[in-house]
Image (cartoon, grey):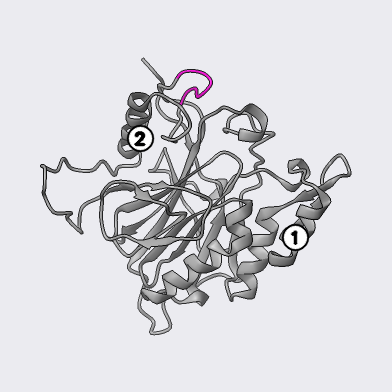
Amino acid sequence: MAASPTMTSTYRRSCATNAPYGCSVPDRAPSGPAVPDRASSGRVAAFRVRRVTTTRAGGVSRRPFATFNLGDQVGDDPVAVAANRRRLATAIGLPPKDRGHGEKIDKGAKGIRWMNQVHGVHVEVVEGPGGAVDNADGLVTRAPLLALAVVTADCVPVLMADARAGVIAAVHAGRVGAQRGIVARALETMVGVGADVENVSVLLGPAVSGANYEVPAEMAAEVEQSLPGSRTTTRGGTPGLDLRAGIAAQLRTLGVTAIDIDPRCTVVDRDLFSHRRDAPTGRLASLVWLEPRL
């Protein structure tokens, strides 16, 4: 029997003692001011924000996807991926209810919403559980207890939330999407459904680090032009990209101050999937959801 899925908070010191599979990420960034627990009106935020990142342990997939692969477009057995996704939903306490054929989506139902990511800039607003959203690299919702998931194996998972307004977003930001503005578009979509930029907190999850992301000099210069702060030098002294640094800089120019960056590099940390290190390989998942305060 496979072990239980292993999940971590990328903000380890904030692990909730009653949440063994995930942790609440506080609305504070190391380099930014605290986002108050009360809105400008003095009203306490109605939601807690939960953010979780999986590792590769605790699933049923076989090599080279062993074992907790959550990506369904990488060549893994679909039965294994489905089993892993069910394990994840159960582990975080958000298993979806069974719906009969033709039954309408219950906007109050809980579960996980996935995307079929394409390295694009389309952001979709979702209202409840359902099938994977095609051709999307960002999801936004106001629905509580609906986790938004992004799958990665070197790209940057971006988890954004406004706990005051009750709006969250999950974004897949690879080089192409980040360069074309997927993160800014997701933030704009959040604002369009009621979020306030000043109250948005962001977690940039595990991804390939600049020290291990070598690219041609021309590519580094091109990305830097669109995403200032992303060009860097690898540990080998060659041109490289630090997408998380560039995304963080972009978010700050857009008015977001509560930004936290997971320090783990997917290429270095063998507890995580990495396409650059191991292709073909699986995908880890990063999720964000709103939990109503009792």
- 118 displayed left or right of 206: left
Furthest-bottom residue in this view: 41
Label number found at residue 222? 1
Above or below 22: residue 33: below
Provide the major secondary structure of the magenta segment.
loop
Q: What's the magenta region? A: 62-67
**Sequence-first disc among 1 and 2:** 2
Which residue type does callout 2 highlight?
Answer: Arg
Residue 150 appears in the picture as rendered: yes
Above or below 274: residue 234: below
Q: How many tags in the picture?
A: 2
**Which quadrant would residue 255 be assigned to in this image?**
bottom right
Residue 32 appears in the picture as rendered: no
Residue 191: % across, % down: 43, 75
Residue 72: % across, % down: 41, 34
Name the residue located 31 percent from the left edge and 53 percent from the top edge: 146
**Which quadrant would residue 126 be assigned to in this image?**
bottom left
Residue 179: % across, % down: 64, 60
- 46 displayed left or right of 179: left
Name the residue located 55 percent from the left edge and 56 percent from the top edge: 203
Tell me the quadrant of the picture where the N terminus can be found. top left
Foreground residue, 216 or 294? 216
Above or below 4: residue 239: below
Furthest-top residue in this view: 1
At label 1, counting other C-alpha atoms closer than 10 Å, the crowd grade (few under 14, some 14-19, many 20 or more) is few
- 231 displayed left or right of 152: right
Q: Judge whether residue 106 is colored magenta.
A: no
Which residue type does callout 1 highlight?
Answer: Glu
Residue highlighted by disc 2: 85
Q: CA distance from mark 1 to mark 2?
A: 37 Å
Above or below 10: residue 80: above
